[in-house]
Amino acid sequence: MAFFSYLISGLSLGAIYAIIALGYTMVYGIAKMLNFAHGDVIMVGGYIAFTCSISLGVNPYIATIISALGCMVLGVLVERIAYRPLRGAQSLSVLITAIGVSYFLQNVALLIFGANTKSFTSIINMPPLKLFNGELTITAEAIVTIIVCLVVMALLTLFVNKTRLGWAMMAVSEDKGAATLMGINSNATIGLTFAIGSFLAGIAGVLLCSSYPTLTPTTGAMPGIKAFVAAVLGGIGSIPGACIGGFLLGILENLSKAYISSQLSDAIVFSVLIIVLLIRPTGLMGKKQIEKV
Amino acid sequence: MLEVKNLNVYYGMIHAIKDVSFSVKKGEIVSLIGANGAGKTTILQTVSGLIKPKSGEIIYNGENIVKISGHKLVSKGLAHVPEGRRIFAELSVIQNLKLGAYTRRSNFEIDETLKNIFNKFPRLAERKNQLAGTLSGGEQQMLAMGRALMSHPSLILMDEPSMGLSPIYVNKIFEIIKEINNDGTTILLVEQNAKKAMSIADKVYVLETGNIVRSGNASELINDEAIKKAYLGE
Ligand SMILES: Nc1ncnc2c1ncn2[C@@H]1O[C@H](COP(=O)(O)OP(=O)(O)O)[C@@H](O)[C@H]1O
Ligand SMILES: [Mg+2]
């Protein structure tokens, strides 16, 4: 039973990575940039929810929505102010800017909230699920997190494959110039991608802080990097890939913590990434190159 | 319908288009011919707003469109079949076509246009659910044309539509261009296949390293000795 309990908490951690990885992968797929500040948007989401629900006493679900919307606005502003002027610049310049944005957000949080750890109260106020006469306990946070992740993935897949805007995103992702010739505003489409990714980061922030209730200005950094690894593992640019990568990473991390060593778990996770990339450089679900005729 | 006046385009320090002027009247096929690197693609991309010129005017239906973003020109009736086709390889044929109608709102009208395009290009109808990247070169060219027609344009810019195609497809593509023109669409055609282009064009401009060096009616230029020598391989 202990194994299943580790497995489920791994799934739940993986679901958080997956939601973050979705933002990474969509922005990469469409804007062709690695938004290294994405992890810090999660931290901002955590602080917004913390301020609303704990300092101001707002209903925790409403606080979650405020947090997601706040992150959405933040993501769009960051894209507009920091990344859009660099459209067409070398990818190294964009990457350095993204790292700059990351430090900027961390330091603003430090300035406002201080370095002390804030203890977050879970927004999910439900009893855990006990199975097999109480031998297996599943927290409500784990259940909610996994369900939210699956719903988000399904909605995003539908959005991208079935709606006009989703097709526009795919068109911009393949060829910005040709998309412009279709009458698609590629800047607006990239902005929309940031909006969606950052909205999800806000939700991920609240879920993360509900399961791991400590909040500091660097809370988002490590999950951000792990989610990036998940996105690469699954095949960067691929929506189902981000989910599979996230779940695999969460499970792997938790099982290695439980059975091998909690110090080595990160090293194990990164080794697996390296091995997978050696065998399949495009990741598990990475796009096959279509041969151009 | 389209009047380009004293256009100058730079790539960094490179002066790619030098004071170019030309015009396209409603209902015409105007052909822009010239060797590789002469600046034909640059001119088309500037007209459709993908590249911003350093100076000059582009008057389209009486309006100077130089400052208008490229994506806003499509709903003004300007379509562009780009060099190398640039279809969306990872989307299906039908998705490509529907993206061509991105700026149109009425589903009924879009379906009507789609029907017409499937009549014109039966191959596309047969392959509508296939990924566009799996089509042959000639089929991709037809898709690129069909996609441009989906916006119901009044002026189409075509950049080397016959490039890389087998002779059978080349003839077919030129027939289709003629047909599109007969349906009432004005065409600005860029070609390296000067002979074919001149045979269907009303007016011809000859471009050499960013300058227009000759212009005139196609019927006159096609018999011009210098043109014959330089561009028609005779
Ligand atoms: N993106 C670019 N950057 C720099 N120079 C370019 C670029 N595109 C084209 N050029 C240069 O501009 C000139 C005209 O190119 P182009 O318009 O593609 O000619 P054509 O379509 O007639 O073959 C060429 O000398 C080419 O090398
Ligand atoms: Mg060209």
Image (tube, rainbow, N blue to C red):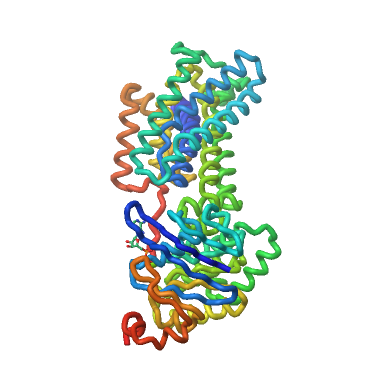
Residue A139 in sight in this render: yes
Residue closest to the eye, B87 or B58: B58
**Residue B133 in which image quadrant:** bottom left
**Residue B151 in which image quadrant:** bottom right
- Where B92 sits versus A238, above or below? below
**Residue A162 placement, left or right of A250:** right
**Residue B86 placement, left or right of A131:** left
**Residue B14 placement, left or right of B87:** left
Q: Give the residue drawn at x 66%, y 18%.
A: A58
Residue closest to the eye, A210 or B87: B87
Locate residue A126, reporting x and y percent.
63, 21
Residue B118 in sight in this render: no
- Where B197 sits versus A77, above or below? below
Locate residue B73, reporting x and y percent.
57, 58
**Residue A38 placement, left or right of B27:** left
Locate residue A271, reporting x and y percent.
30, 35
Residue closest to the eye, A26 or B187: B187
**Residue B112 in which image quadrant:** bottom right
Q: Give the residue drawn at x 47%, y 58%.
A: B56
Locate residue A111, reporting x and y percent.
46, 15
**Quadrant housing the C terminus of chain B:** bottom left
The number of discs equals: 0
Residue closest to the eye, A226 or B44: B44
Q: Give the residue drawn at x 47%, y 50%.
A: A173
**Quadrant housing the N terminus of chain B:** bottom right
Figure quadrant, ligand 2? bottom left
Q: Give the residue drawn at x 58%, y 22%.
A: A128
